[in-house]
Structure formats: C-alpha cells, structure tokens
Image (tube, rainbow, N blue to C red):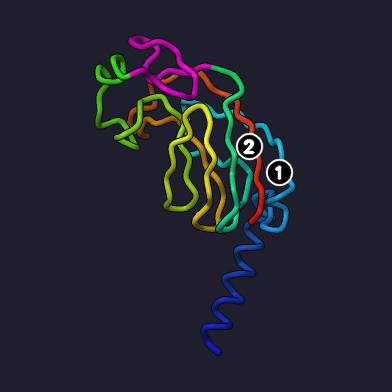
Amino acid sequence: MQSKLATLLFATLTAGSCVLAGASPASATTHYGKGKRISSEIGWQNAGVYVEPGDMVRIHYVSGRWTVDYREFPYVSSAGYPRHIDRRIYQPCKILSRHPHGSMIARINNDHYRVGGSALIEARQAGFLQLRINDADGCLRDNDGSVRVKISVADH
C-alpha cells in the first residue's frame, strides 16, 4: 500500500511539474515537427518535449552554425568538427568523449545520445528531452552561434 501511495504521489508531482514546464506526458505525440533553436553558449536546454520509454524521437538539423571557440575554430553545423580539427581542441571539454566537439548531443534524464546532424533515438526512460553542443559547461564562455533543429516524437 505504501509503495502504491508513493507511486501515485510521484506520478502526481511529475504530471504537475510537466504542466508547469509547458508540456505533459499525454501531449508527447503532439510535438510533431516542433522547431527549436539551441544555443552554443548555454548548457543543457529543454527542448519542450516529454517522452515515455519506447518513444521514438527524431531530431534533425535544419540550419545555423556554431563554434566552440570563435577566436580559434571555424563555425560548423550540428555535425561538429572533422577529426583533423577536433584533435586540436582541448579534449577534456567534451561531454561525450567519443564524439566530435561541436556536435549536438541529447539527454533524457541520465541517458546521453549523439545527435550530430540527425538522430533517431528510442527513449529508454521517461523525461524531458534536452539538447546542447558537445562542449562542457566550463568551456562555454568562448562559444558562439546557434543551430535550429526539428523534433518529432512517435509513441510506442
């Protein structure tokens, strides 16, 4: 009984926080074609899309350019830097070390994903989709630019 009450309380609080944040679990499938601008100068940014486990999230780069250092490196799309440039950038600044600096990455709670120019992600957890550039918080001060993406969700 106590665990059912805890689950009910958690579900109520989660639904309430979703409403406060401008989205709800029930509206996840209504976000077809949602456009979002992602800045290179800010850490994790809420995409305004709530997903459930098993939902298929498609993220597609539309336009824009950004850089991890406007003084030293060129502006790139959300695919990030080619290997020969990536190797010249301070490697501890990467959040996902196996993927290029400047590439777009996503997370849903504690699950991280590489987006790059395009991705189809199967959500493993319920939560809000967040996006950012693959550049750690302490390394954002020299970033510039933004990209625009289109996000769509198909429920399971």
Amino acid type, callout 2: Ile
Quick one: quadrant of the N terminus?
bottom right
Left or right of 119 in this view: 24 = right
Question: Residue 30 location in percent, x, y?
Answer: 74, 47
Residue 125 image point, x, y percent: 51, 57
Report the magenta residues as a range: 65-82
Q: Judging from the image, what secondary structure is the residue with disc 1 in?
A: loop
Q: Residues within 10 Å of mark 1 (few under 14, many from 20)?
A: some
Q: Is residue 132 left or right of residue 24?
A: left
CB under 8 Å between discs 1 and 2:
yes
Query: Is the stretch drawn in magenta largely helix, strand or loop?
Result: loop
Amino acid type at image mark 1: His
Note whether 119 is above or below 24 in the view shown: above
How far apart, in angstroms, are the residues tagged by discs 1 and 2? 7 Å
Residue named by callout 1: 31
Question: Looking at this rendering, what residue extends furthest in the bottom direction?
Answer: 1
Q: Nearer the viewer, residue 51 or 42?
A: 51
Within-10-Å neighbours for mark 2: few <14, some 14–19, many 20+: many
**Is 99 placed above or below 87 here?**
below
Queried whether the magenta region covers residue 135, the answer comes back as no
Q: Residue at x 71, y 35 (%)?
A: 33
83 lies above or below 38: above
The numbered dot on residue 124 is none
Q: Position of residue 114 (x, y in %)?
A: 43, 37
- Secondary structure beneath dot 2 equals strand
Q: Identify residue for label 2.
A: 151
Residue 113 on image: x %, y % = 44, 42
- The first of marks 1 and 2 along the sequence is 1
* Screen quadrant of the C terminus: bottom right
| Residue sitting at x 52%, y 42% | 130
